[in-house]
Image (cartoon, grey):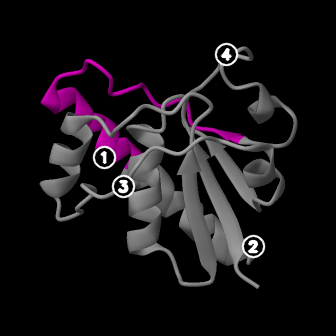
């Protein structure tokens, strides 16, 4: 049975969406991956779409999703991209969660969003390696 991996950020319009896209690209098929947020935006951040397209990942059709308790309950691994506010992300504080503390790309320059993208790629690849060892 595939393991469920969940990436979470507040608006699900940047960091968690990039992590989901990288995980889909690099992970073995025995994993299901999803991203969501407690207050999802209406669309992905244009700078996020642009910097991912620069490296060959098309995210135009991805949509922010609302985080639910069942998503967290059914995940084998949940990754908090940087939401450290109990009020914004209360469900992230109820079980063991990886905290990556990655800056929000909102209102950042393209160069800053590229740095965030590359950090997320690095973290996702390390997560996949650790899951394969455990797995």
Residue at 12%, 54% (x, y): give it.
Answer: 54
Q: Nearer the viewer, mark 3 or mark 1?
A: 3
Residue at 39%, 34% (x, y): give it.
Answer: 42
Q: Which quadrant holds the C terminus?
A: bottom right
Is disc 2 placed on a helix, strand or loop?
helix
Q: Which residues are magenta?
A: 98-120
Residue 66 image offset from top left, x and y in percent: 59, 41
- The front one of 121 and 44 is 44
Mark number displayed over residue 85: 4
- The front one of 98 and 12 is 12
Residue 10's quadrant in the figure? top right
Q: CA distance from mark 4 to mark 1?
A: 24 Å
Q: CA distance from mark 3 to mark 4?
A: 25 Å
Q: Which residue is mark 3?
A: 62
Residue at 48%, 51% (x, y): give it.
Answer: 123
Vertical position of residue 132 compared to residue 115: above or below: below
Q: Which quadrant holds the N terminus?
A: bottom right
Residue 17 image offset from top left, x and y in percent: 42, 48
Left or right of 95 in this view: 12: left
Pointer 3 local density, CA inside 10 Å: few below 14, some 14–19, many at least 20: few
Mark number displayed over residue 118: 1
Sequence-earlier tag: 2 or 1: 1
- The front one of 37 and 42 is 42
Is disc 4 placed on a helix, strand or loop?
loop
Q: Which residue is mark 2?
A: 134
Sequence-earlier tag: 3 or 4: 3
Q: CA distance from mark 4 to mark 2?
A: 30 Å
Left or right of 38 in this view: 19: left
Vertical position of residue 45 compared to residue 123: above or below: above
CB of mark 2 within 8 Å of CB of mark 3?
no
Residue at 25%, 33% (x, y): give it.
Answer: 113
């Amino acid at each position: 049975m595939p393991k469920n991996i969940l990436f979470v950020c507040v608006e699900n319009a940047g960091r968690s969406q990039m992590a989901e896209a990288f995980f889909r690209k690099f992970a073995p098929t025995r994993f299901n991956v999803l991203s969501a947020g407690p207050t999802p935006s209406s669309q992905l951040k244009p700078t996020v779409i642009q910097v991912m397209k620069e490296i060959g990942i098309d995210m135009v059709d991805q949509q922010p999703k609302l985080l639910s308790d069942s998503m967290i309950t059914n995940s084998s691994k949940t990754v908090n991209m940087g939401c450290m506010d109990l009020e914004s992300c209360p469900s992230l504080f109820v079980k063991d969660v990886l905290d990556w503390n990655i800056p929000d790309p909102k209102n950042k320059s393209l160069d800053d969003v590229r740095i965030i993208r590359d950090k997320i790629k690095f973290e996702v690849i390390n997560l996949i390696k650790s899951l394969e060892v455990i797995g």
